[in-house]
Image (cartoon, helix red, strand yellow):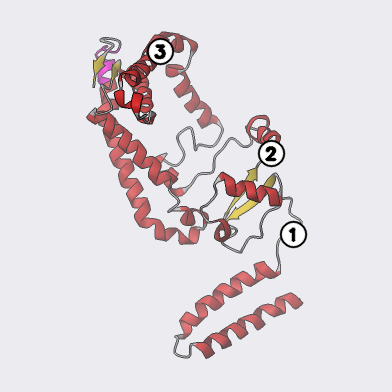
């Protein structure tokens, strides 16, 4: 009870000091920080104790550790924290709790032994837009829907029969990468970033399996459009710009412009793939053209 009595005393002292320092400030503006103080003080005076949670840095009410670590969750900072708090520690980022596991044996326990329990990824406001509220394989909760999606992916692409059927084509695409690098004089003298060429190889592997067709080169307009849409989606989804609204829901209204940008990109991206790939495969399947000829170009 003594702690509880401190709350109104601190509130009155805060209001008196603010009015003395800013006599012309409207009363409603003075009341806003006062109200926030009243909301925060009970959490400070009555911290949660005895909970079976890992150790970690002291978290502020509402914001948690977000004000301390911000968006800088790179592995070096996490290693430094592990030295202080142990191999398993807890970061509270607004309404989300993030448990960091640094020990290899414990990581194997989480990722393999108890993989089912930890198999579901936490969703966020941006990925919900790009995955239709977690209906893909990556952000869906582990369960019936995930198993159904796995079957959808496995049967046409990863069964032993399919692997043997397309093995020669996969090896051919890899040989083309090696050949292109050998023939590239710039690569021989100055070096070259192979990421884009490997990306072209992966796209060609997928599209030859779906359409019996391939992109001719990295300058192919359709290839450039496809990679742009995917890169832009990754940029928006992996950005730190929207983290504050995801961690602290009361700040989410400030994300309206960012989320509208994501929705617009998703509409254009789906329209692009529907026009260029879904309808094309439906046409080829309807007219029994899949499988001939094997080396047409987009």
Counting residues from the N terminus, which is met first, the one under dot 1 or under dot 3?
1
Q: In the displayed structure, would residue 90 be above or below residue 152?
A: below
**Which of the 4 quarters of the picture holds residue 34?**
bottom right
Q: Give the Cα separation between the discs numbered 3 and 2.
A: 38 Å
Magenta segment: 282-290
Q: Nearer the viewer, residue 149 or 43?
A: 43
Q: Is residue 210 left or right of residue 8?
A: left
Q: Is residue 62 left or right of residue 228?
A: right
Q: Position of residue 37 (x, y in %)?
A: 58, 74
Q: In the displayed structure, would residue 133 be above or below residue 222?
A: below
Which residue occupies the extreme front position in the image?
189
Q: Which residue is mark 3?
A: 171
Q: Is residue 243 left or right of residue 204?
A: right
**Which of the 4 quarters of the picture holds residue 58?**
bottom right
Q: Are marks 1 and 3 in contact (CB under 8 Å)?
A: no
Q: For mark 2, does the 10 Å Cα neighbourhood hold few (<14), some (14 to 19), or many (20 or more) residues?
A: few
Nearest-to-viewer mark from 2 and 1: 2
Q: Which residue is mark 1?
A: 49
User: Could one spot residue 54 in this view of the protein?
Assistant: no
Residue at (44% x, 45% y) in the render: 238
Q: Which residue is mark 2?
A: 103
Residue at (34% x, 56% y) in the render: 257
């Amino acid at each position: 009870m003594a702690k509880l009595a401190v709350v109104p005393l601190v509130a009155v002292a805060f209001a008196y000091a603010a009015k003395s320092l800013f006599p012309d400030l409207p009363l409603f503006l003075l009341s806003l920080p006062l109200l926030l103080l009243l909301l925060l003080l009970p959490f400070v005076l009555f911290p949660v104790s005895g909970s079976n949670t890992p150790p970690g840095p002291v978290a502020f009410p509402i914001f948690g550790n977000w004000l301390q670590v911000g968006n800088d969750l790179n592995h070096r900072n996490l290693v430094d924290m592990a030295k202080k708090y142990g191999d398993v520690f807890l970061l509270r980022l607004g309404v989300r709790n993030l448990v960091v596991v640094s020990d290899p044996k414990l990581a194997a326990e989480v990722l393999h032994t108890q993989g089912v329990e930890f198999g579901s990824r936490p969703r966020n406001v941006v990925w919900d837009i790009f995955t239709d509220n977690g209906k893909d394989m990556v952000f869906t909760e582990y369960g019936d829907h995930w198993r159904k999606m796995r079957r959808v992916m496995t049967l046409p692409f990863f069964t032993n029969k399919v692997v043997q059927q397309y093995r020669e084509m996969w090896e051919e695409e890899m040989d083309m990468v090696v050949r292109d690098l050998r023939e590239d004089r710039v690569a021989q003298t100055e070096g070259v970033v192979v990421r884009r060429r490997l990306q072209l190889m992966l796209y060609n592997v997928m599209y030859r399996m779906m359409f019996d067709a391939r992109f001719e080169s990295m300058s192919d307009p359709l290839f450039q459009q496809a990679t742009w849409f995917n890169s832009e989606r990754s940029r928006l989804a992996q950005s730190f710009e929207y983290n504050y609204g995801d961690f602290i829901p009361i700040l989410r209204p400030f994300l309206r412009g960012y989320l509208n940008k994501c929705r617009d990109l998703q509409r254009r991206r789906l329209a692009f793939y529907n026009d260029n790939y879904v309808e094309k495969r439906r046409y080829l399947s309807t007219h029994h053209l899949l499988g001939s000829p094997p080396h047409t170009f987009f």
